[in-house]
Amino acid sequence: MNEVSRRTLAVLGSTGSVGCNTLEVAHLQNDHFSVRGLSARSNVQLLFEQVQKFRPELVAVENIAAATELENRLASEGLAATKVLKGVTAATKLVEELSPDVVMAAIVGSAGLYSALRAVELGGCVLIANKEPLVMAGHLFQQAAKQSGATLLPVDSEHNAVFQCIAGADLAGQSISKIVLTASGGPFFRHAELPRWPTLSEVTPEQAIAHPNWTMGAKISVDSATMMNKGLEVIEACHLFELPVKKVSVLLHPQSVVHAIVNFIDGSSVAQMGLPDMRVPIAYAMSWPQRFESGVSNISLAEVGSLTFREPDFDCMPCLGLARDVAKEESPVLATTLNAANEIAVEAFLKGNLSFVKIPEVIAKVLGDCNGNPGIDVETLIRVDNDVRKQTLDLVHSR
Ligand SMILES: NC(=O)c1ccc[n+]([C@@H]2O[C@H](COP(=O)([O-])OP(=O)(O)OC[C@H]3O[C@@H](n4cnc5c(N)ncnc54)[C@H](OP(=O)(O)O)[C@@H]3O)[C@@H](O)[C@H]2O)c1
């Protein structure tokens, strides 16, 4: 392929787990992609190495001191052709200035909301890994995509799997009776005997982060351990596939081989399988509607031997129950509250300021105080996000 037919790519959250995997696929598929933009919060060393390798036009760095450090380093190493954007709006500015063909939205948490939404408003192809903004404001993403003509492609492995299962089907929700998102159970809920929640009181951040099947960033790894990740994914799925929550269910599947199953009204069930490696869904989103190599081999079912499935037990998994209850309400303010309280509670746990078992307790308390503000615009949701963060932090510190 020549330069004209290479699609321009910006990777938001390029130093993270999804970001690095995306750049690996982009490097492998160098004929198809020209990496023009990178973004991170503060990881100067890795950003520098990524600039050396991909020579993007722009890099966005949220932390101002880190941005200045990177700028100086690029200048002294003869890489000043890459311009550095600084501060909380840098990733959004990067998307606006480059308006790339493809944006990978892989910042973690609600911090990625503006840049991902702006990418959708600009009408390109947006690959969404960053689930928290979808949980908060999925309706705004769908609305913006309809207005701009943007293509919104799911990267989260379960949602990408659903997308693969329904490829070619007329969506409109009519032919689908249910979608089933599988959950490995993380480090604590993978065995037949599920632990009762209070017995997890001694869990340390190291134990919670040690996911048995996937290598991921710290926040999503803790979310997997509490099962909040699956709860957020249920809300994400409702938005992405425009389905009511009664059509989205969860199945425990410790081997993480089947990523999702779609049940159709004619009795067919279509499942997507693959090794638990994010390069598979990332490559599918990057190559869609074609396919290209991701660098991952096919799974050998003979080697896996057996696959097991069972229903989750909500009594053992309070975070999943909280998210399911919020999903039923279809309220962006409640979903934003759930997400923000969870982000702060997880951060507090990772810093050693909150015990693992208190995470759902704190979230439930904050949800209980939510005044049911009916706002659905982005300014309201950002205000709710900020307020809930402060409220949750106060609650954590008062314990
Ligand atoms: N990891 C997975 O396998 C996986 C699978 C499915 C979905 N997801 C979703 O994808 C997203 C990314 O997950 P991850 O595991 O890749 O996270 P991660 O490894 O923690 O990486 C997060 C990325 O976001 C950047 N970042 C963090 N805070 C920021 C801020 N305030 N402003 C701007 N950039 C910021 C980080 O920069 P620094 O490195 O400089 O801090 C890093 O590049 C999450 O929403 C997650 O739920 C991840």
Image (spheres, grey):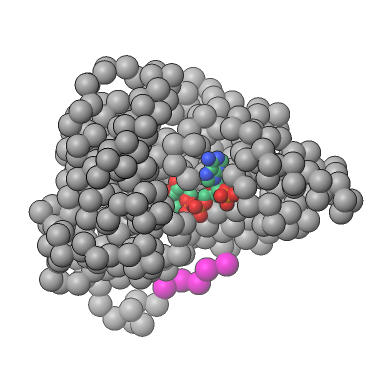
Q: Do we see residue 192 in this rendering?
A: yes
Mainly helix, strand or loop, the magenta region? loop
Query: Can you say which quadrant of the picture contains the C terminus?
Result: top left
Locate residue 256, reporting x and y percent. Answer: 33, 66
Identity of the residue furthest to the front in this view? 398
- Residue 184, image x and y in percent? 29, 63
Q: Residue at the spot x=22%, y=21% of the render?
A: 372
Closest to the observer: 3 or 200? Answer: 200
Q: From the viewer's side, name the closer residue of 61 and 139.
A: 61
Measured as percent of width and height from the top left, residue 327 is found at: 23, 36
Residue at 70% from the left image edge and 29% from the top image edge:
97
- Image label count: 0
| Residue plotted at (50% across, 37% down) | 112
203 w.r.t. 230: above or below: below
Residue 74 highlighted magenta (yes or no): no
100 in relation to 6, above or below: above
374 lies left or right of 78: left
Image-based side of 362 in relation to 352, left or right = left
- Residue 189 image point, x, y percent: 22, 65
Which residue is at 48% across, 45% downward?
108
Query: Please, which residue is most extreme toward the left here?
Result: 315
Q: Quadrant of residue 67?
A: top right
Residue 127 against residue 95 in the figure, above or below: below
Taking 86 as reference, is 118 left or right?
A: left
Residue 288 visible in the picture: no
Magenta stretch in the rendered image? 295-299
